[in-house]
Structures are given as C-alpha cells and as structure tokens.
Image: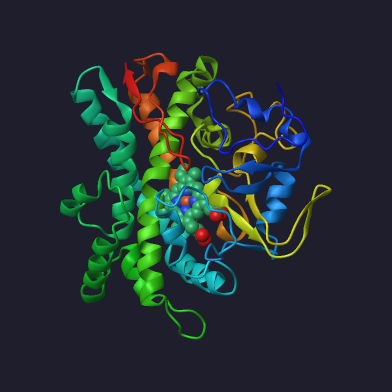
Amino acid sequence: MAMQPGDCPRYPFDWPSPIDQPKELAGLHDRPALRVELPSGDTAWLVTRHRDVRALLTDPRISKNRNRPDIARMTPPSGTPVKHFQNQVDMDPPGHTRMRRLIGKAFTAIRVEGLRPRVRTIVEDLLDGMDRGGTSAELSAAFAHPLSLRVICELLGVPPAERGQLAGMTAPPWEYMRELIDRKRREPGDDLVSEMLRVTDADGARLSETELHWWATVLLLAGYETTAHQMLSAVVLLLCHPEQLAALRADPGLVPNAVEELLRHQVVGTSLSMLRYVTEDLDVGGVTVPKGASVIPSLECANHDPAAFAEPSTLDVTRPATHQLTFSYGRHFCVGAPLARVELQLGLEGLLRRFPGLRLAEPVDRLRRRQDPFTQGFVEVPVAW
Ligand code: HEM
C-alpha cells in the first residue's frame, strides 16, 4: 500500500531485490518533503523530487556542517565513523569552496584521462585472472574490489607492495595516509597526493596539513568501496535484464549511456550520508521545512522521479540519463565522478566482451546483501560464463 500523508517511514528504504523497487517509492513524489525515521531513531525531512533535490543542493541556507549539537544522528552512537569524518574540515562555504578549488586544481580531467590506459590494463589483467581460474568466479573479490582499489592507489600514488594492506580495510587508514603524505613530501612523484602538496590558490595558499590528510583519506575510501559496489550493482542489474544486456552487447558504443542509466537505477545507494541542516525556513514544493531541521536530499528518490525520468522503474540503457543524481549535485558533487565513470565504462565493456556467456551463478534473490544503512550493496556476486 502506498504511504499515507502523515506516515513517518523508516529510512533508508529497503530495496527488496534488483528487480523490485522499494514499496515506499509508490506515490512518493506526490509528497515533496516528508519526515522519516533514521536508524538512530532521530527524524529528518526527506526531499523526494528531482527538481527540489537539485535546488536544495545549491541552496546557501543548507549546511553540511555535522558538528551542530542539534543535527539528527544518522546511526546509533556506536555506528560507523562517518560523523567523525565530518569533524575534520569545514564542509560549508567559504572554507569548503577554497579546499574544493585546490582539489580541483590537482584532480583535473587531464589526470583522469591520463589514467585511462592504466585502468584498461588493470581491467584486462583482472579479466585474464578470471579466465585462467575456470568458468566461474565471485565478482566482488575477483574483479570489482581489486579494480577500484588498484585504480585509486594508482591515482594517489600508493606503491603496489602496500596495496594489499588497504584491501578490506574496516576503518579509515589515517595513520597509513599520514605516512604516505610525509613520504610524498620528501620524494614527490606525478601522483595526486604529490600534486595536492604542490597546488596553491591565487594568494599562494595551500591545503593545510589537516585538510590534506582528510581529503587524501576520503579520496581513498570514497574511491574504493563506492565504485566497487556500483560496479556490482550495474552487473547484477544487467544480468537481471537480458533484453538490456543484449542491446548493450549488440552495440558496445552504448556503454557510456548505459552507465548513466545503471547509476540512476542502482540498488546500492541510500542517501543517509547526504544529511544536511537547514539554517532558515525553506519552502520545498509547498511544504515548509523549518529552520533547525535536518534534511536528506534523496538521490535515489530524485532518480526515480517520473517528472525527470519517464517510467522510472524501467531500466532502459538507451534513455538519456545524464541528469541522474547518483554523484550528487552542487557544492559537494562527487570529485571522483569522472574517474568512476572511466572505471565503470571500461570495466563493463571488458566484462561483456570477454565473457559472452556471463550469468549469475545463483538466483538473484539469494545474493547476500550488505546490512549497511550507507551502502545497501551486495556482499558477493557469484557469476559463471
Ligand atoms: C560510482 C562511484 C561513486 C559514487 C556513486 C559516488 C558518490 C558520491 C556522492 C553522492 C557524493 C556527494 C555527497 C554529498 O553531496 O554530500 C560524493 C562525494 C565525494 N566523492 Fe564520490 N562517488 C563515487 C566515486 C568516487 C571516487 C572514485 C572518488 C575518488 C577518486 C570519490 C571521491 C569523493 C569525494 C572526495 C567526495 C567529497 C566531495 C565534497 O564533499 O566536496 N568518489 N561521491
């Protein structure tokens, strides 16, 4: 049954399977903003429409400073270290704007394009390994995680011998990153960390020690897990939609477009970590979200808004979906989006080309799902070919 006005559903919604949408999405866009209960038990306003989510993410009355005592807690106090993360640097303008400008100077489109041949080599190397291993594999361990780890390590300049210790990390590798930064300061290379040490803004100012440490660590974490889970989500979605898979195999030139649609339709993300704070009363589609409230611009709800995407519950790799919001929008738009796109495009293209008979080795409803309110991805994806 669709939700009724006044309901306060739990958030994140449960994605029952890659082919079934959360039941809460039915009729949700009739309500531009509604109150939801978070895993902590606190409540926040969920913003559901594509247009409103974009407006919110560029609105100066919205803050991402999570140090306020009255902001909603995302998870119970013993939960993940995400809150601790936010405490390291200023997440609002002008401090955040200054840091993003410096990061942007270092993490350029040219740098991402320069990595493309390396990404291709890493993809082929992992596919060779799968091929040598027989006719089945577990895709998370054999492909998705090693791919994103190797690529982010290439980007940051983590030497190959040290990458193993970062695989499967359960906590942010603060100490390791501090040591890496010290080393890059002594022996600079052509990697991103060395470049982040070099860049200066118009006044000659640099990233502070704390800022550099925080951003380098976040780049590693954000670049690793998120991309791996999106890759798994994309493959599972395609394998569950044979006609879409066939269209892509028939025309590999569709892959970049398909990646946007697979990101839009993904079953991995929740927008819990998008939590913001409202500094003045806001009108969201006729609903007043009051000053002092916590608010979640929901990327997955926006991506399923029928006003932005016709028949949003249909996966269609030919639809124009570049306005999908899985990388967010506005001030905090994902720094790594261009790199993630390269990985997803080359990874999917390679997988489909090398394994024409690729299929799930287990029924889709038996795939183990992560019990994580920040990333509802797959723990394992066994495949065969
Ligand atoms: C498909 C993979 C990825 C997805 C879906 C994704 C998604 C996101 C989202 C939704 C945000 C914005 C959060 C907000 O508005 O509060 C974000 C920010 C960020 N992402 Fe990504 N990301 C991905 C890959 C990457 C990669 C590969 C890197 C690094 C190379 C990266 C680094 C970052 C960083 C540093 C931020 C913080 C930006 C800021 O606050 O200004 N991400 N990402």
Q: Nearer the viewer, residue 350 or 337?
A: 337
For the point 23% across and 30% down, the residue is 128
State the residue in front, 158 or 304.
304
Percent across and percent down for residue 314 are 63, 23
Figure check: 131 above or below 89: above
Quarter holding the N terminus is top right
For residue 145, above or below residue 357: below
In the image, residue 352 above or below residue 94: above
Residue displayed at 39% across by 65% down: 214
Q: Can the viewer see residue 337?
A: no
Q: Quadrant of residue 60?
A: bottom right
Q: Position of residue 256 (x, y in %)?
A: 52, 37
Quadrant (top left/top right/bottom left/bottom right) for the C terminus: top left
In the picture as drawn, the residue positioned furthest to the right comes out as 286
Q: Is residue 312 left or right of residue 370?
A: right
Is 68 positioned to the left or the right of 166 in the image?
right
Which residue: 50% across, 17% down? 246
Residue 373 located left or right of residue 385: right
**What residue sits 70% from the left and 61% below the top?**
59
Q: Is residue 283 visible?
A: yes
Q: Nearer the viewer, residue 75 or 369?
A: 75
